[in-house]
């Protein structure tokens, strides 16, 4: 995702982009296409501020029930294009140093970082996901657990034992 500086006008402007995964150097299969990007740009006398909003969908697998599910991913980033060289880029990683000769700035690393930060550590299809029964392996969102049926049968166990004992006698 490259920004052409000579196409920017003074002041505020918004650029909306529909990006492919390739545009953002994303190879992860969980990412869907496209990625929508909205760049709110302000070009001042000395520097250019870029506020990016990103939106796409992810295909994930639920940690609890192991079923695939879709997640809408929103991310944002900010970068400042500044000609001030005295500012070391170590001070603020959002600063991109530019010179009067800079025609193009690559925002890909900012967008990628923002997106990857938003991927949840815990992937759960729904807060109410019941998960998988460790006993019978059934997805409890869809199926009824077989272990529960066994427990129901247990109520008849004393009677069964009684009958067996009688038979043995
Ligand atoms: Zn689930
Ligand atoms: Zn079960």
Image (tube, grey):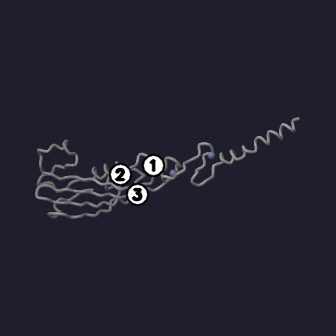
Mark 2, ligand 1, within 8 Å: the answer is: no
As helix, strand or loop, the secondary structure at mark 1 comes to loop
Q: Kindly identify the residue that appears in the image at 16 percent across and 61 percent down.
A: 6
Query: Where's the N terminus, which quadrant?
Result: bottom left
Q: Residue 66 at what x, y percent from top left?
A: 52, 49
Q: Kindly identify the residue that appears in the image at 17 percent across and 59 percent down.
A: 5
Give the quarter of the image for residue 101: bottom left
Q: Residue 118 at what x, y percent from top left?
A: 36, 50
Residue 21 makes an appearance in the image: yes
Q: Of callouts 2 and 1, which one flags the residue occurring earlier in the amino acid sequence? A: 2
Instruction: Give the residue number, with chain letter if any, for mark 3.
Output: 72
Numbered circle sitting on residue 26:
2
Q: Of callouts 3 and 2, which one flags the residue occurring earlier in the amino acid sequence? A: 2
Can you tell which of label 2 and label 1 is closer to the viewer? 1
Distance from disc 2 to disc 1, alpha carbons, whole Å, reads 20 Å
For the residues bearing labels 2 and 1, Cβ distance under 8 angstroms: no
Q: Kindly identify the residue that appears in the image at 63 percent across and 52 percent down.
A: 144
Q: Residue 146 at what x, y percent from top left?
A: 66, 48
Numbered circle sitting on residue 169:
none
Give the quarter of the image for residue 51: bottom left
For the residues bearing labels 1 and 3, Cβ distance under 8 angstroms: no
For the residues bearing labels 3 and 2, Cβ distance under 8 angstroms: no
Instruction: Give the residue number, with chain letter if any, for mark 1.
Output: 123
Distance from disc 1 to disc 3, alpha carbons, whole Å, reads 12 Å
């Amino acid at each position: 995702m490259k920004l052409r500086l000579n196409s920017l006008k003074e002041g505020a402007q918004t650029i909306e982009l529909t990006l492919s995964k390739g545009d953002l150097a994303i190879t992860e299969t969980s990412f869907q296409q496209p990625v929508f990007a909205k760049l709110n740009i302000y070009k001042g006398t000395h520097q250019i501020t870029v506020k990016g909003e990103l939106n796409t969908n992810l295909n994930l697998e639920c940690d609890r029930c192991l079923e695939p599910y879709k997640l809408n991913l929103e991310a944002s980033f900010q970068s400042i294009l500044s000609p001030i060289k005295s500012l070391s880029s170590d001070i603020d990683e959002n600063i991109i140093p530019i010179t009067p000769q800079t025609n193009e700035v690559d925002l890909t690393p900012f967008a990628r970082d923002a997106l990857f930060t938003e991927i949840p550590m815990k992937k759960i299809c729904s807060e109410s996901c019941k998960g998988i029964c460790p006993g019978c392996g059934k997805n409890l969102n869809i199926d009824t657990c077989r272990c529960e049926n066994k427990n129901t049968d247990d109520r008849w166990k004393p009677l069964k034992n009684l009958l067996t004992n009688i038979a043995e006698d």
